[in-house]
Image (tube, rainbow, N blue to C red):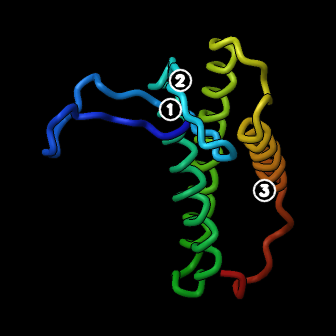
């Protein structure tokens, strides 16, 4: 989406800018900028929050629970690993669904940007990973825990 500018008028004090703000798009090659319309900002905010929580918090927690499993007693690390991964995948599905629905609603073509293509790739890879996790190999002995 891009940065947001805000202008407080002639005042030099920090304060609320009211409605005197808008998202802008900056062309880094030319230095040109222009304000852009930002319909459905609530949906895009929800998309971003879901993706951040999934991939910025839950997925790293799942990985760390496996890396530091020796610090946990018994299968607790695996339960944390499963919960964090399942929650990350659920939020990924929600973020993906929001993106697909609102790209369509805004009349844009699907997979038109590198961000959209990366999101589709992440969704496919995460889905394959969940399918692999649903059919794990037999668990080894107690030394695994």
What residue is rendered at 75% in x and 47% in y?
A: 122
Q: Position of residue 75 (x, y in %)?
A: 59, 73
Q: Which mark is residue 24?
A: 1
Nearest to the eye among marks 3 and 2: give it: 2
- Please name whichever residue, 5 or 54, is drawn nearer the observer in this view of the structure: 5
Choose top left, top right, bottom left or bottom right for residue 13.
top left
- Please name whichever residue, 99 or 97, is drawn nearer the observer in this view of the structure: 99
> Is 33 placed above or below 104 here?
below
What residue is rendered at 69% in x and 15% in y?
A: 104
Q: Position of residue 119 (x, y in %)?
A: 73, 41
Mark 3 residue element: helix
Q: Mark 1 packing: few (<14 Cα in 10 Å), some, or many (20+)?
A: some
Q: Which residue is mark 2?
A: 36
In the image, is 120 to the left or to the right of 63? right
What residue is rendered at 81% in x and 49% in y?
A: 125
> Is 136 placed above or below 12 here?
below
How far apart are the two marked residues, 1 and 3, measured between alpha carbons?
Answer: 42 Å
> Is 44 placed above or below 114 here?
above
How far apart are the two marked residues, 2 and 1, measured between alpha carbons?
Answer: 5 Å
Give the quarter of the figure containing the N terminus: top right
Which of the two discs, 1 and 3, labels the residue nearer the N terminus?
Answer: 1
Q: Are marks 2 and 1 in contact (CB under 8 Å)?
A: yes
Q: Mark 2 packing: few (<14 Cα in 10 Å), some, or many (20+)?
A: few
Q: Which mark is residue 133?
A: 3
Nearest to the eye among marks 1 and 3: give it: 1
Q: Which mark is residue 111?
A: none
Which of the two discs, 3 and 2, labels the residue nearer the N terminus?
Answer: 2
Q: Position of residue 138 (x, y in %)?
A: 84, 68
Mark 1 residue element: strand
- Please name whichever residue, 50 or 77, is drawn nearer the observer in this view of the structure: 50
Q: Are marks 3 and 2 in contact (CB under 8 Å)?
A: no
Choose top left, top right, bottom left or bottom right for residue 30.
top right
């Amino acid at each position: 989406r891009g940065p947001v500018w805000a202008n407080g008028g002639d005042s030099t004090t920090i304060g609320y800018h009211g409605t005197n703000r808008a998202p802008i798009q900056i062309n880094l090659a030319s230095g040109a900028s222009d304000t852009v319309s930002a319909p459905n900002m609530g949906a895009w905010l929800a998309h971003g929050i879901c993706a951040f929580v999934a991939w910025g918090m839950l997925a790293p927690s799942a990985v760390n629970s496996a890396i530091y499993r020796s610090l946990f007693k018994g299968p607790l690390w695996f339960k944390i690993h499963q919960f964090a991964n399942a929650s990350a995948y659920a939020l990924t599905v929600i973020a993906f669904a929001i993106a697909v629905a609102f790209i369509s609603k805004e009349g844009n073509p699907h997979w038109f940007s590198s961000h959209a293509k990366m999101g589709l790739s992440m969704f496919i890879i995460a889905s394959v990973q969940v399918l692999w996790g649903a059919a794990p190999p037999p668990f080894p002995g107690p030394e695994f825990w």
